[in-house]
Image: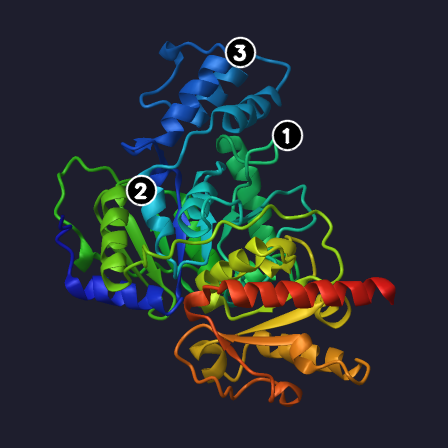
Amino acid sequence: MSLNLDELFWEDLLAFIEEGKVIPVIGQGIVTFGPEDEPFYPWLAERLAEKLSIPQSELDQPPSLNRVATAFHLRGKDQPNLLYTRLFNILKKECPEPGPLLRSLAQIDAFKLFLSTAVDPLLENALNLERYGGEPCTEAVSYSEGLDRKDMPARMRDLNGALVYHLFGKASPQPEFVLWEADMLETVIDLHDQFKRTGTVDNLSRDLKAHGLLLLGLSFSDWLVRLFLRITQQEKLSLRVHPAYLADSPDKMLPSDMVMFFGAVTRSVHVVRCCPKEFTRELSRRWLLEHPRDASQPPAALKPIPQEMPKGAVFVSYAREDEDAVRRLIGGLQEAGCTVWYDRERLKPGAYWPSELEDEVKNRCGLFVSVVSRTTESSPEGYYHRERNWAAERYDGFSQGHAADEFYIPVVIDESPLATQNEPRVFARVQCTRLKNGAATDEFARHVFALQQKRQQHLAAS
């Protein structure tokens, strides 16, 4: 289909996305479920009304959560928390599968951070299905006034995988999320206050300021959109709307049927007057045309995460650009019986991840797998270089006779030369193994398992 948009707009937008300069802001308008992409929030509002015995005659059409909450409070109920508990239980027990729309958005793998104004888990579920073989690996951070930790665990460039930041909280049994307009007002006031402070939401604040925002499923006339732009600019908001990108559409089209792209570089706002669902489908289609997925090598489904990781695990150091291959490698090692410490699973919101990584490398891991690629060989910066230097420090403390290749295992996952350039000098003589796209051979996986068994026995005896 065609949205009659200027091709230069698509070219610019796709280029910004490819360079990691865009954060998608997801509103309720593009949250869908089922094979037919049915609107999720009208369904949720209707189910909540049924649970609260509110008749259809008291609802708007299509029904909204705000209207359900208003009708509930007008009845003078003395259990205000019942609203939140009932909605949470619906999502816990009846939550449907995300629709094709969210799944197509999840296929744009250049999107690492998603800012969501919705409170449901469908976006996370879509990301898990499309990127992680259905395993619950997508990280979610929920903003709430009652939470001590409100910020992202790291800047977007340092995230180890997909993260969804729920700006208005995520459904829970307590009123810790936005359900209706009264909640919205309090949350926006608190959010504005947090952005003015230092040290509360610094990672989020800096990323919003440094990146463009692609607003999908929010109303252009909504004051919340103006808030997003105000926070992003972090100065007095002066909208510079460029209507050159308006799509042909019926006169009856409502302001909510719009898409906005706020460019952090040009500091301008592009308004696309079209259905956000249609825009999202077209964006995903164009992205996949330029970045086709390798259907022959789907993301690996990793084993369940143990609550306590024993000493002697295999630590995998990698660049975030290589995550698909890394997951494939980890899956192969796990199939051979290896215990793998994978930062995407072990690092949790609120933890100080630099110290956790350093402790695992310097004190706890049994083997260190260094994933070598074009990215790690060409970039002089990257946290993986620090991890590999920690591994070198760790090896310096080993007793004589402990061979370097019994601890440090470099793996080349693409066409990069086996004669690596950026590995620590102490490991320069360790032979690299080429595992294209991270596909571990049986021989390699058995070798690593045998080394790990030997190392764990040594750690247990020491």
**Nearer to us in this view, 432 or 280:** 432
Q: Is residue 422 above or below residue 371?
A: below
Crowding at label 1, few (<14), some or many (≥20) Cα neighbours within 10 Å? few
Crowding at label 3, few (<14), some or many (≥20) Cα neighbours within 10 Å? few
C-alpha separation, residue under disc 2 versus residue under disc 1: 30 Å
User: Which residue occupies 56% across, 60% down?
Assistant: 333
C-alpha separation, residue under disc 3 versus residue under disc 2: 37 Å
Question: Can you tell which mark lies on residue 75?
Answer: 3
Marks 2,1: beta carbons within 8 A: no
Q: Is residue 239 above or below residue 451?
A: above
Give the residue at mark 1.
Answer: 174
Give the residue at mark 2.
Answer: 101
**Nearer to us in this view, 225 or 418:** 418
Name the side, left or right, on which 427 lies relative to 378. Answer: right
Q: Position of residue 306 (x, y in %)?
A: 67, 48
Q: Is residue 281 above or below residue 241?
A: above
